[in-house]
Amino acid sequence: EVSGLATGSVKEFINNGDYQITLRGFFDTKYPDSYPQEDVEVLREYLRVTNSLEFECDFLFMLINPFINRVVVTGYNFFQQQGLRNVQYFEITMITDFNYDIVKV
């Protein structure tokens, strides 16, 4: 327990203000038989990063907090729709992150 905090424990204090973000999107090409290979490969490289990723998004800054500008990818999924060879759908789940220093006093 931590005295002086509205929440009772250190874990509750650290988790206070975390946001989960789900991003759904797709890549496509203008040719019906051409797969968007390069776009998918670039996205997969970002998803494999083991550190937090910095982002800029006015919409998220307005909804969440203008000082939170980092996310950690917690999962992702690629899926396709039957009959669409030139489209690759994806879904990415992330949690907000920010740099902080723990100081012993």
Image (cartoon, grey):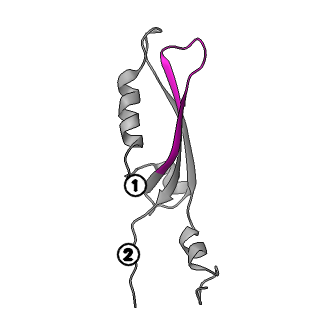
Percent coordinates x, y for residue 23 in the rendering:
54, 41
Image spot of residue 69 (x, y percent)? 42, 57
Residue beneath label 1, please?
Answer: 52
Q: Is residue 103 above or below residue 17?
A: below
| Mark 1 neighbour density, 10 Å: few (under 14) some (14–19) many (20 or more) | some
Task: Give x and y (percent) for residue 19.
Answer: 57, 58
Q: Is residue 34 above or below residue 24?
A: above
Q: Gap in Å between the C-alphas at discs 2 and 1?
A: 16 Å
Mark 1 element type: loop
Q: Does residue 27 sit above or below 102 in this rendering?
A: above
The residue that mark 2 highlights is 101
Q: Main secondary structure of the magenta part?
A: strand
The type of residue carrying mark 1 is: Ser
Q: Residues within 10 Å of mark 2 (few under 14, many from 20)?
A: few
| Image quadrant containing the N terminus | bottom right
* For residue 86, above or below residue 104: above
Residue at 45 percent of width and 54 percent of height: 71
Closer to the camera in the image, 74 or 5: 74
Quadrant position of the C terminus in the picture? bottom left
Q: Give the left or right position of residue 13, taking residue 101 as reference.
A: right
Going from N to C along the chain, the mark reached first, 2 or 1, is 1
Q: Is residue 83 magenta?
A: yes
What's under tag 2, amino acid-wise? Asp
Q: Which residues are magenta?
A: 73-91
Relative depth, front residue between 86 and 62: 86
Q: Residue at x 52, y 32 (%)?
A: 90
Q: Which residue is depicted at the point 37% across and 47% down?
A: 49
Query: Horizontally, is 79 left or right of 42 in the view?
Result: right
* Relative to 89, 42 lies left or right: left
Q: Is residue 34 magenta?
A: no
